[in-house]
Amino acid sequence: MRVATVDTESVPDRVGAEPSLDAGVQHWNPFVRIAFRFCFVYFGLFCLVYPRIISEFLGLAGRLLPESVPFWLARLWGPLVEWTGEHVFGTDAAAHEDSISGDQTFLWVLLFCILIVAVVATVIWTVLDRRRPNYAALSGWFLLFVRLCLAAEMLAYGLSKAIPNQMPPPALARLLEPYGEFSPMAVLWTQVGVSQPYEILLGTAEVLGGMLLFLPRTTTVGALLSLVCTMQVFVLNMTYDVPAKILAFHLMLLCSMLLAPEARRLANVLVLDRPADRSTRRPLLGTARGNRIAVGLQAALGIWLLVSGVYASWDGYRDHGAGSKEPPLYGIWTVAEFSIDGQQVPAVVTDENRWRRVVFDRQNATVQRMDGTLVPVIAIVDTSAHTIAMVLLPTAPGAQPTPLGAFTFDQPAPDRLAMAGQLNGRSVSIDLQQLDPNTFPLRSRGFHWVQEYPYFR
């Protein structure tokens, strides 16, 4: 097919320009037109429907809404998704809105439905609009939409690490858990959480990539940095079984889509050692003033999301994260003596009633049995009344907490604790000695410039 071109040297590089698939070409290749139609429908629907992407734009306002709000657009697809899950895949595809997993059956089937809709829409669009030479104007607005969605998600991803909330330092109970019982995801979370500077650097790179995407002139470098970050996230999700594979993979694709119009220029500079061609950016609006306003609005959106994201992340870090105040009795307490109904219970590993340790952490508490089993509990400590109420955490979604015990306590010394009360309907008396968490090298080893021999334990 004969391709007509215009002289890109005569096209001014105007403020607010947005990359298009090829602004200097009047007639796109038929394959490019078909690919654009598919991407427009598929990724447009994905960004609108997949929980959390559009909701990121709410910023601080999103804190006033119920946690299930990010599911509201996906919920509209519920009947179709559930029918498809049952009749096509033979599985229950109900959405679990109380779960933070991004790889639920509902979401995989939703992705399949979006794919089918995109294929059908592409075929119909191609038949009805086959004579159109290009979609230069539409591609500019579509890539703007994709760019802002990607930028918002990169900010959310990055701020949760730059202010280390996503992967906090290992909980006290983790220090007691055998490494072999860690899930792959727990290994990843723990190894990143141990090194806060590393986590902050990872988050800072993602935040920088997201902020660069809010300005048209820095879109390419922002997309490149975001592609590197999302590729790393995707590899970690795949190799450590983190349930965020769908989102990470699609974020990589969104980065690639933004880089596609600049592929030839990037190849010339990075691979072929040639001068870069003139940018093919196309102005979104018809006037320079309109484009300047558009750029200002994009920058303002980026600042709004950055400020609101920092506030929300810092608020979470301070209120219930690693920066929160240590609760009463915080620490690991080893049971020295344990009596039931006035009778001393020896420390035998096969005893199912005697406790080995009690951990009071920031979010909850943990009871360690004699065989090493860790039982998570909710501990309500009243320092004025000197009482402790313990409730077993539910082991299944929708289950109700089960009362475990109620105690009074006395602390004769900072490292000594005496508890007495009812445990599973029986009278108990427990004397405990505090264990210094810094005896664990995972907390105390720190950083060393000089090491004559590797410290590997």
Image (cartoon, rainbow, N blue to C red):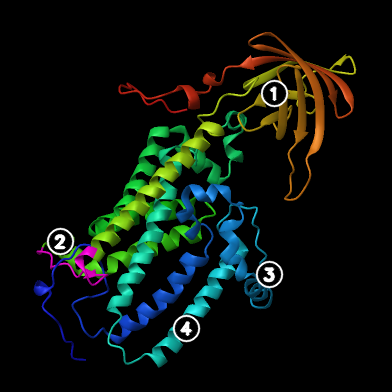
Say which of marks 4 and 3 sits in front: 4
Give the residues drawn in magenta, as a range: 274-289
Q: Which residue is mark 4?
A: 121
Distance, label 1 to label 3, CA atoms, is 43 Å
Say which of marks 1 and 2 sits in front: 2
Q: Which residue is mark 3?
A: 91
For the residue marked with disc 1, what is the amino acid? Arg
For the residue marked with disc 4, what is the amino acid? Ala
Asked if residue 126 is among those painted magenta in the image, a careful observer would answer no
Q: Residue at x 18, y 91 (%)?
A: 2
The residue closer to the viewer here, 453 or 418, is 418
- Find residue 279 and report its image quarter: bottom left
> Does residue 44 appear left or right of residue 274 in this picture?
right
Q: Which residue is mark 2?
A: 269
Question: How far from the left and from the top, in percent, is residue 277?
Answer: 13, 68
Question: Upstream in the sequence, badge 1 or badge 4?
Answer: 4
**Dot 4 and dot 3 residues touching (CB under 8 Å):** no
The residue closer to the viewer here, 262 or 271, is 262
Q: Residue at x 46, y 43 (%)?
A: 160
